[in-house]
Amino acid sequence: MEIEEAIKILCKNVLPIKETEEVSLIDSNGRILAEDVCAEFDQPPFPRSPLDGYAVKGVDTFDASEESPVILKVIGKVYAGEVYKGKVSNGEAVRIMTGAPIPDGADTVIRQEDTDYGAETVGIYKGQKPWSNYCHAGEDFKKGEVILEKDLTVNSGIMAVLASLGKNTVRVYRKPRVAVFSTGDELLMPGSPVQPGKIYESNNTYISSRLMEYGMTPVSAEIVPDDPDLMAEKIQKIAEKADLVITTGGVSVGEKDIMHDVQEILKAKKLFWKVKVKPGSPTLAFMYKDTLVLALSGNAFAAVANFEILGRNILYKMYPSERIRIKSRLVTMKGALAKPSGMKRFLRGYADDDTVVFSEGLQTSGAISGMAHCNCMIEIPAGNEGAKVGDRVRIYEI
Amino acid sequence: MEIEEAIKILCKNVLPIKETEEVSLIDSNGRILAEDVCAEFDQPPFPRSPLDGYAVKGVDTFDASEESPVILKVIGKVYAGEVYKGKVSNGEAVRIMTGAPIPDGADTVIRQEDTDYGAETVGIYKGQKPWSNYCHAGEDFKKGEVILEKDLTVNSGIMAVLASLGKNTVRVYRKPRVAVFSTGDELLMPGSPVQPGKIYESNNTYISSRLMEYGMTPVSAEIVPDDPDLMAEKIQKIAEKADLVITTGGVSVGEKDIMHDVQEILKAKKLFWKVKVKPGSPTLAFMYKDTLVLALSGNAFAAVANFEILGRNILYKMYPSERIRIKSRLVTMKGALAKPSGMKRFLRGYADDDTVVFSEGLQTSGAISGMAHCNCMIEIPAGNEGAKVGDRVRIYEI
C-alpha cells in the first residue's frame, strides 16, 4: 500500500473532534476556536486621540501659521481613561492626551508640537483639516462584527485580539486524547540502571513530547512487555477514554511481534499492515470499537518518520491546529546519497531556509544519534536513484 | 537612532544566563543544554540483530540455495531483552528476534524468510556474508563520545536521544526572568465590565503569551496606573528577581507619559529614547542597577513590533534558544502599499512559503484586529516608496 493510500484510510476512520470547552484566555494558545468571536462594542469604543495635543474644530485652525498663530480658549483637559463631559465650540480647545476620547464638537487634534503648549489659551501654529488626527469609533472593528472565525488556531496575536474584545475566556474544541504505548521486553525506562541485552526506551519520549508541543498531554504513556494479552487489555481499557492509540514495536514478522495477536484478541478491524515506505514499512493499523490504533515499528527513526507522516495526519484530521499541520517545502540538496530505494524513503536532514544536508550520524532506522542535529525529514521518491547535490527535494519540518 | 544600533546597545547591556539547573527529561523541551552530554555506554550496547531470523557463522551459508538448503543445528533461541549465554560454532544456529543480542561466535543473521523456519534444525535458502545483517556494538554511538553539545536547544528529537542515553534528567540553563507591566489609567482587565473612556489591555497578554511560547512564565504580569512613583516602586521591587523588565505605554511626549519620570525617580541610566522605526519610535530603554528596562509604546502593533525586534534580540542574547531566534526570510509581495516612510517600517502580513500579503484590517499602530490573521511582519526599508506587487521583501515570522 502506498503511503498516500494509508493516510487516506486512516483519516477516513477518525472524525474531527466536536466537543467544546471554555478555557481561560492565558491557556488558549494553540487551541482551536469552536465558535466565531464577535465584537460586543466598537473599537475604539469612542473617537480616540492618536496623539498628545489639543482637540479643536479644524475649521478654526485653517489660517494658523507660526508667524500668526490662531489663539483658542482652553476649556478643559482629558487624559486617557477619562471622559470630558463638555462640548468644544468654535474658538475653543480641550487639552487631550493619546488614547483619550475626543470630546463632542471637536473634529481633529492638533499635535502639541504644533502649539505653544498653552494652558489657559493655546496658540496653534499649524492647522489641520477636520477628521484628520481623529480615530473614529469603530474604525478598528464594529460592534457585532465577526473578528475571529471559528476553527482559527489561537496564537499570541489572536490572544491579544481576544483581550482587546474584553474576553478572558474562550470556547475551544477539546484536545484529542492520545495514548502512547511502547512494547518490548528489551526496553528500560530512562534513569534506571543498565541491564544486559536491554536498551533504553526513546520512542515514547519522542511521541509524547511531540503531542505536548501540540498542547496535548498523553492520557497514558507506558512501556508494555511483549505480552499480547496484557497489551490487548491495556488498549481495551484506554479505548474508553482515548481517541487514538499509538504503539511502537511488535509489528514485524517475528515471534515477539505481538501487535498482530493483539488485534485478533481484541477482534479489532484491521485497516492495513505494511506501507510502501522506508523506514517503518511494517506499520499496522486497526480499529478497536471507535478507537484507531496506529501500531508503528519500534526502530527509532521508523517510529519518528511514521508518527510524523501518518500520526500527524490523523491528529490534524481530528484537530486541525496550525501546530499540527505538516510543514513541507522544496529545498536544494547539499549532500548526496547513492543508495536508491524501491519505496519512498525518508532520511534525517538539517535544513536552513533554502538548502538541506543529511544529518550527522547513521541513517539506519534503528539508529538514534542522528536525531541530535536533525530538524527535518528529506523525502526521496520511490525508484529514485538516491539524491544528488543540487536536487530539489521535499522536506518535512520536525 | 537606527534600530540596528538600538539592538546593539540593548544586547551590550545584558549577559547570557550562566546559572544552571537540573530538569526532568519530560520538562526539558525548549531548554538549552548547559553541558555536553556524553554516552555512558555503546549504542547498541551489544551486537544487535536488525531482523528476525537465525544467528549463524556466515561462512557456513555460502553454498545455500533454495534447491539445496544448508542445514544447521538450532542450539537455542534469543529474544530482544534476553542474552544467549552460549556460543555459536560452525554448523550451528541460534533463533534470534529483532533487537536481541547476537550470540558470541555468530557473525551474521539469516532473515527468517530465507529459511524453512525450523525449530530443531533449520534449512537456510540463501547465504549471507559475515558481518552483514549485523549491527555492531557502538555503531550508533560509542561510550565516552559527546552526543549532544552544550548550548543545543532541546527538541523532541534530542529528548529521544537523551532517553536512549538513559537520562531522565538533564542540566540546562535557568530561564530568563521577565516582568511585563502595562501602564495606563485607561486600561481594563479583560473580563471586567466595559467602562466609558477605557479600553481592554492586550499588550500584556501578547508579550506574556510570547514568553510562554519560549517556555518562560513572566515573574510578574500587571497593569499599572499612570503613577510614576508607583511604577518606579514596582520596577525597584521586581528588579531584585527579574533579568529584564518590559513595559508598554507612557513613553511618548504627553503629560501621562510617565516612563521618563520613572527613569529619573529610579536614577536609572538611560540607554536611548526614540528609535527610527515605525510603529513604536518612542521606545525608551534604561538600566536600573543590573536590570534592563525596555519601555515600549502602548499602541498595540507598536508594542508587538518592538517586542519582536528589540525584546526578542535581548532575550536571545540572554538565552539563545532556537524558539526565540528570530526567523526571517525573503518572500514575494502580493499586495501593494503606496505610503512611503522616512523610517524603516513594519507592517502586518500573512505569509506562505514564498509569498506574503498584507493582513486584513487597519495597519495603524493602534489597531488590533489586524493581528487576527497575521503570521509575520513585513519590513519596508527606510526611504522606500512603499511596496509594489512582485517586490522581494523581508518578513519576520511572529
Image (spheres, coloured by chain):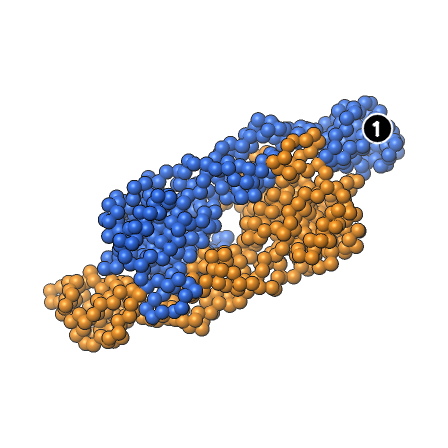
Chain colours: A orange, B blue
Q: Residue A31 appears at what percent x and percent y? A: 53, 58
Whether residue B110 is situated above or below residue B393 in the rendered picture? above
The residue that appears at 35% across and 43% down in the rendered structure is: B240
Image point 33% across, 43% down: which residue? B291
Q: Is residue A222 visible?
A: yes
Residue B259: x and y in percent read: 27, 53
Which image quarter: residue A385?
top right
Residue on which disc 1 sits: B75
Indicate the secondary structure of the residue bearing disc 1. strand
Report the front residue among A184 and A130: A184
Answer with left or right where residue A327 lies relative to residue A184.
left
Depth order, front residue of A81/B213: A81
Q: Identify the residue shown where x is 45% and y is 59%.
A: A159
Side of B297 relative to B355 (left or right)? left
Residue A376 vs B40, above or below: the answer is below
Query: Is residue B33 visible from the viewing direction of this image?
Result: no
- Residue B13 placement: quadrant: top left
Q: Residues within 10 Å of mark 1 (few under 14, many from 20)?
A: some
Callout 1 amino acid: Ile
Number of marks in the rendered image: 1
Q: Position of residue A248 (x, y in %)?
A: 68, 45
What residue is drawn where x is 17% and y is 70%? A74
Q: Chain of mark 1?
A: B
Q: Position of residue A247 (x, y in %)?
A: 68, 47
Q: With B60 as the anchor, is B335 left or right in this view?
A: left
Work out whether B384 lies above or below A359. Answer: below
In depth, the one of B85 and A385 nearer the eye is B85
